[in-house]
Image (cartoon, rainbow, N blue to C red):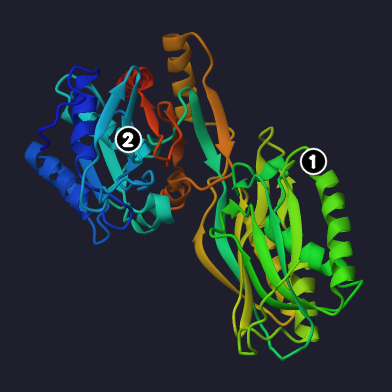
Amino acid sequence: MSDRKILEGIEPAEVFRYFEEISAIPRPSGKEKKISDYLIQFARAHGFEHYQDALNNVIIIREASEGYENQEPIILQGHMDMVCEKNPGVTKDMSNEGLDLDVKGDFISAKGTTLGGDDGIAVAYILAILDSATLRHPRLECVITVGEEVGMDGAKFIDCSPLKGHLLLNLDSEKEGVVLAGCAGGASEKVILPITRKPFNGQRVELHVSGLTGGHSGTEIHKGRANAMLLLFRTIMEASRETGVRLISISAGTKDNAIPREAAATVVVEDFSKFLHSVQISEKNIQREYRAVDPGLQMTAKEESAIPESGADEDPLTMEDTRRVIALANSLPSGVQRMSDEVDGLTETSLNWGITSLTDGEFSMCASVRSSVASALAALVQKINWIASAYGAETVENGAYPPWEWVEHSKLRTRMSKIYREMFGKELVIKAIHAGVECGLLAGKIHGLDAVSMGPDIFNIHTPQERLSISSARRMYDYILRILEYKNA
C-alpha cells in the first residue's frame, strides 16, 4: 500500500511491513474509516471471517490450526486510532496525511509528530500473526476497536457475540515485561450550581496560582501533587475571613483527567491590603505543605488597572452565591480516597477536579472519578451527588466505563509467567493500573474473561518525541507467538 520502505530490513520483517503500511494511513480518533476499511480488505483478501460495525470497529477470525481445534480460542485485541500531536511549525495535516517514519539506532519515531506506537504495533502484531503460514495456533479472534484514546467508545459499543474465547491478550500496553491485569473504572462527573450576579463597587483583583507540577489524574494521583484549582478556592476562602470577597470569573484546567497546574480568578474585594496579606500567608503555608512535590508553587494577587464597564459577565456574584461556590468547592472530596488492599501501591479509588468555569448563569466543576472496585466507584459518585445537592447544585455524569477488577487466579497469567521465565530467565511483572483500559469494558461483555494487557517499550507516548524500541518489539513478538503456540495437555 505504501511505496516507502523506511523499515525494510528490520526484523521481524512481517511485523514492521504492516507497521509501515499502517503508518501511511491517517487514523486520528473519530476518523478511523480508512484504517478500518484497510483491515476489512486484508480480511477479505485472506478469506477470513470478518465483521465491521457502524462505528468502524473490526473483528477478524482465523480458525484453529490442525491439531489445535480443541484448544481454547484466544482473543487478540488492540485499537486503531492514535493521538495526533505535532511540534510547533510542523504543517502536516494528520487527518489526511500519513506519518513520516524515521529510524535512529534501536528506535522508530515519526518526524515532528506522534508515532501512534501503541495502536500501531498492536495492529501490526495482529496482522502479522493472521498472515503467518507457519504459526500453529488455536482459533484466533482479533478485535480492533476505534476511539480508545478519547473515551473507549469502540470497546463500549462493540458487539462481542461473534467471539467464543475467554482468554484475551490486549497488545497496546507500553512496557516490556510488565503486564496489566486490572484497571480502574470511572466516569466524568460535573457539578453545576446556578448563580446570580449583581453590581458591586470594590477593588477588582486578579488572583493566580501557578508553578505546579500537575500530572495524570489516574497514574499520578497518588503522588500527592497540588491541584491549582482547589488551592485557588482555598485561598479565596481564607481571604474572605479578613475582608469581603466576591467572585467574577474563574479559569482552571482543560481536561478532567489532568491535575491542573495553573488557576486564575477575578474577584472584587472590599480591602485590597487585607486580601493581599491573606494571600501571602496562604502562599507561605501552602508552599510549606507541598514543598516536596510542588517546589515551584506561586500565588500572586494584583489590582486591575482598567475596570470594565458593568455588564452581565463582569458583575460579581452576590455575596451569598460567592459563599456557596467557595463552600461547595472546598467541601467536595478530592484526590486519593483509598489505596488497594490487594495490590501493593495501587490507588483503588480517587477523583480529580480538572475543569472549572463561571459563566453568566452558572458555576461548574468537572472531575474524573476512578475506582477499581465498582461499589466504591458508585459510593463516591453518590457522595458527590449528595454534597452538591446540599448546596443547591445538580450533577451530570458522562463517559462511564466499568473497572477491570483484579482476579486472584488466572489461567492466562500462569501460562504467560511460565513462558516468560523460560524465554528470558526472569519473572514477569504483573500489575494493575489506576486508569482506564479497554479490557475492563470487554470483561463486562464477556462473562468470565481472563485478560491481560501487554506490549513492547514505547517512550514519550502521545508526544511528538514518541519512540518505539525495535529490539523490544522483536522480543515481545516472539513472546506472543510462544503464548499462542502453547498447547494444553
Residue drawn at x 19%, y 26% as measured from the top left: 6
- To which quarter of the image does residue 302 belong? bottom right
Is residue 140 at least partly visible in the picture? yes
State left or right for residue 242 relative to residue 359.
right
In the rendered image of this protein, does residue 430 appear above or below residue 402?
A: above
- Residue linked to disc 1: 291
Disc 2 from disc 1: Cα separation = 41 Å
Label located before the other in sequence (2 or 1): 2
Q: Position of residue 106 (x, y in %)?
A: 35, 18
467 horizontally vs 281: left or right: left
- Where is residue 325 shown, x and y percent of the image? 74, 76
The residue identified by callout 2 is 122
Quadrant holding the N terminus: top left
Q: Is residue 74 visible?
A: no
Residue 232 position (above or below residue 124): below
- Residue found farthest to the right: 242
Q: Quadrant of residue 247?
A: bottom right
Q: Amino acid at mark 2?
A: Ala
The one nearer the camera, 319 or 341, is 319
Q: Nearer the viewer, residue 299 or 414?
A: 299
**Looking at the image, is 90 positioned above or below residue 411?**
below
Element type where label 1 sits in the image: loop
